[in-house]
C-alpha cells in the first residue's frame, strides 16, 4: 500500500499544474518558440522584400535562385525607374534566356535619353574592373571583348525578338541600328551591327536584298580601310588609339566571319567576293599580310 502511494506521489511530482508532464511541456514550449521564429523570419523576409527588393535580388542570386532574383530586380526597377536597375534586369534576363523580359526591358533601355552616356560608363567600369582584377594575361582580350556594350545588348534584343516570333521587327530594328553608323568611321566610333542572330543559314535571309548588301559592303570597306591605315601607323598611335584599333579589329573579324557563313547560300555581295572576305579575315587574324 505504501509503495502504491509513493508511485502516485512520483507521478504527481512529474506533472505540472496544467496537467502536462514536464516532457510534454518542453515540447509545447519548443514548438511555440519555433513557430514564433518562423513567423519572425517570414515577417523579416516580407519586410525586406517590400522595402529593399535590391537586397532580396542579391540574396536570392547568392542562393542560386536566379528566377526569383530577376523578379526582385524588376520590382526594384519599377520602384526607382533607375537606368542602373534596368541594366541589372536586362543582364539577369540574358542569363536566364528570359526573352519576354529581355524584349520588354531592352526596348525601355534604348529609349532612355542618356543611353549612350550610360553605355560609355558601363564600358569604362568593365575595363576598370578587369584592370584591377590582376588577370594580366587575358586583360586586354577581355577589355576588347567588352568594349562595344551597345552592340552586345542590341544583338541580344534582336535575339529576343526572333525567339518571340517577331522576326520582321528584329529585321527592322537591325537595319535601323545599322543606319546609325558614322558616315566617316574613326577609331572612336563604335560600330553598329545587330545582324548577328539574323545572319544564320537557318533564318530567312530575304532581308539581305541588293540594297542592304550594298550598304554592308560600303560600310565594311570603309572600316577595313581604316584598319589597314591604322595598322601601318600603329607604332605612332597613343595608347587609347591603339586600344580602339584592336576594338575595330575584333568587330571586323566578327562581322566578316558572320558574312562568310553565307558562302553556301544564294546571297552575293556586289564588289566583295567571299574569297576577298576570307583574305581579309586572314589579315585581321595576323595570318597574312597585304
Image (cartoon, grey):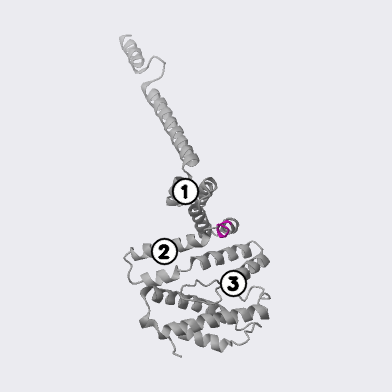
CA distance for labels 2 and 3:
24 Å
**Residue 276 magenta-drawn?**
no
**Closest to the observer, 73 or 223:** 223
Between label 2 and label 1, give the one nearer the viewer.
2
Q: Position of residue 78 (x, y in %)?
A: 55, 47
| Residue found at x 63% / y 65% | 162
Q: Secondary structure at mark 1?
A: helix
Q: Earlier in the sequence, mark 2 or mark 3?
A: 2
Frontmost residue, 236 versus 103: 236
Residue 258 lies in what quarter of the image?
bottom right
Depth order, front residue of 19/161: 161
Q: Secondary structure at mark 3?
A: helix
Secondary structure, mark 2, is helix
Check residue 109 for magenta coloring: yes
- What residue sits right under mark 1 in the picture? 57
Label 2: few (<14), some or many (≥20) within 10 Å? some
Label 3, label 1: how many angstroms apart (C-alpha)?
A: 35 Å
Whether residue 261 is visible here, answered yes or no, is no
Label 2, on which residue?
124
User: Looking at the image, which residue is at 39% across and 76% down?
Assistant: 242
Q: Residue furthest top?
A: 1
**Residue that badge 3 annotates:** 178
The mark lying in front, picked from 3 and 1, is 3
Residue occupying the point 56% across, 59% down: 106
Query: Is label 2 in contact with label 1 (beta carbons under 8 Å)?
Result: no
* Label 3, residues with CA under 10 Å away: few <14, some 14-19, many ≥20: some
Label number found at residue 162: none
The boundaries of the magenta stretch are: 108-112
Amino acid at each position: 500500500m505504501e509503495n502504491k502511494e509513493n508511485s502516485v506521489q512520483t507521478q504527481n511530482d512529474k506533472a505540472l499544474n496544467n496537467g502536462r508532464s514536464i516532457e510534454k511541456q518542453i515540447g509545447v514550449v519548443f514548438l511555440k518558440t519555433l513557430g514564433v521564429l518562423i513567423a519572425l523570419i517570414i515577417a523579416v523576409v516580407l519586410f525586406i522584400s517590400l522595402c529593399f527588393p535590391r537586397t532580396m535580388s542579391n540574396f536570392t542570386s547568392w542562393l542560386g535562385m536566379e528566377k526569383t532574383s530577376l523578379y526582385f530586380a524588376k520590382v526594384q526597377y519599377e520602384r526607382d525607374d533607375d537606368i542602373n536597375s534596368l541594366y541589372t534586369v536586362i543582364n539577369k534576363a540574358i542569363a536566364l534566356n528570359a526573352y519576354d523580359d529581355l524584349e520588354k526591358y531592352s526596348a525601355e533601355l534604348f529609349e532612355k535619353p542618356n543611353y549612350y552616356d550610360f553605355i560609355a560608363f558601363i564600358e569604362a567600369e568593365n575595363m576598370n574592373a578587369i584592370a584591377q582584377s590582376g588577370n594580366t594575361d587575358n586583360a586586354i582580350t577581355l577589355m576588347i571583348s567588352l568594349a562595344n556594350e551597345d552592340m552586345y545588348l542590341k544583338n541580344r534584343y534582336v535575339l529576343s525578338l526572333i525567339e518571340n516570333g517577331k522576326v520582321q521587327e528584329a529585321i527592322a530594328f537591325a537595319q535601323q541600328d545599322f543606319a546609325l553608323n558614322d558616315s566617316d568611321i574613326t577609331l572612336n566610333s563604335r560600330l553598329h551591327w545587330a545582324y548577328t542572330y539574323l545572319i544564320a543559314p537557318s533564318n530567312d535571309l530575304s532581308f539581305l536584298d541588293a540594297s542592304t548588301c550594298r550598304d554592308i559592303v560600303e560600310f565594311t570597306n570603309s572600316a577595313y580601310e581604316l584598319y589597314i591605315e591604322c595598322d601601318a601607323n600603329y607604332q605612332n598611335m597613343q595608347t587609347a588609339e591603339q586600344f580602339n584599333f584592336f576594338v575595330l579589329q575584333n568587330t571586323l573579324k566578327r562581322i566578316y566571319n558572320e558574312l562568310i557563313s553565307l558562302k553556301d547560300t544564294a546571297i552575293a555581295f556586289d564588289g566583295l567576293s567571299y574569297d576577298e572576305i576570307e583574305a581579309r579575315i586572314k589579315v585581321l587574324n595576323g595570318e597574312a599580310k597585304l
